[in-house]
Amino acid sequence: MALKTLLTQNKKSILQRWFNLIADTYPAGVSGFLKDSDRFTNPVGYTISQEINSLYDELLQGRVDSDKAAASLDNIIKIRAVQDFSPQEAISFVFLLKKAMADELGSEIEKKQSFGEWLDFEPGIDKLASIAFDKYVKCREKICELRVNEVKADREIAFRLLRLMGGKNGEHGEAVE
């Protein structure tokens, strides 16, 4: 498979391009900071860098449904789900791989006439995106659940304080609850 060889040989440049495209989805000040992928000074950049590397390897091996690919998507989506991204923006990083590949290998793919192989390879990226969307929805559901529980806990604390301040009944002899 000529395309797989090209993708393997150009892995480093494709991953760098993909990472930069992902970083560019953030506001200008954050984008520059995100590009520092040191584990300790920028754990978000580091996590994204590591996980896209893993995703790329799984994609090359045709294992987009693997537990490893799912875990990598989960780690990135957890980051993007808590940020101010719309669902489309949150999962767009997967599709940016297509752009990174085209930017880095477009002329090579054309020269070697690997379009048929590309058409066979591209659905794997789309499958990753659909898995990422499912993970995004689950993360957002969890965030909503946590917020509801937080409101319930705050409400319970407020009622307890009212009971402590006014005895078992409220000020006007009514039960509080």
Image: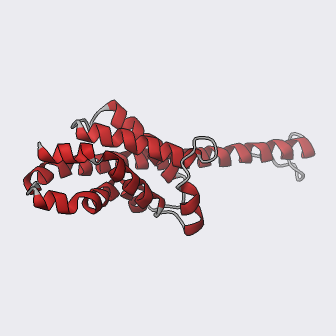
Whether residue 169 appears in this view of the structure is no
Relative to 93, is 43 on the left or the right? right
Observer-nearest of 171 and 19? 19
Where residue 153 sits: x, y (%)? 70, 43
Q: Residue furthest top?
A: 67
Give the x, y percent position of residue 132.
Answer: 36, 47
Viewer-closest of 162 and 87:
87
As drawn, 126 above or below 57: below
Residue at the spot x=38%, y=42% of the render? 53
Which residue corresponds to the image point at 12% horizontal and 46% vertical from the top-left? 2
Image quadrant occupied by the N terminus: top left
Q: Quadrant of the C terminus?
A: top right
Does 92 sit above or below residue 135?
A: below
Q: Nearer the viewer, residue 134 or 173?
A: 134
Colouring method of the image:
secondary structure
Tell me where residue 89 sits by quadrant: bottom left
Left or right: 142 as drawn, with respect to 108? right
Residue 101 percent coordinates (x, y):
27, 56
Q: Tell me which residue sits at (36%, 37%) in the image.
A: 70
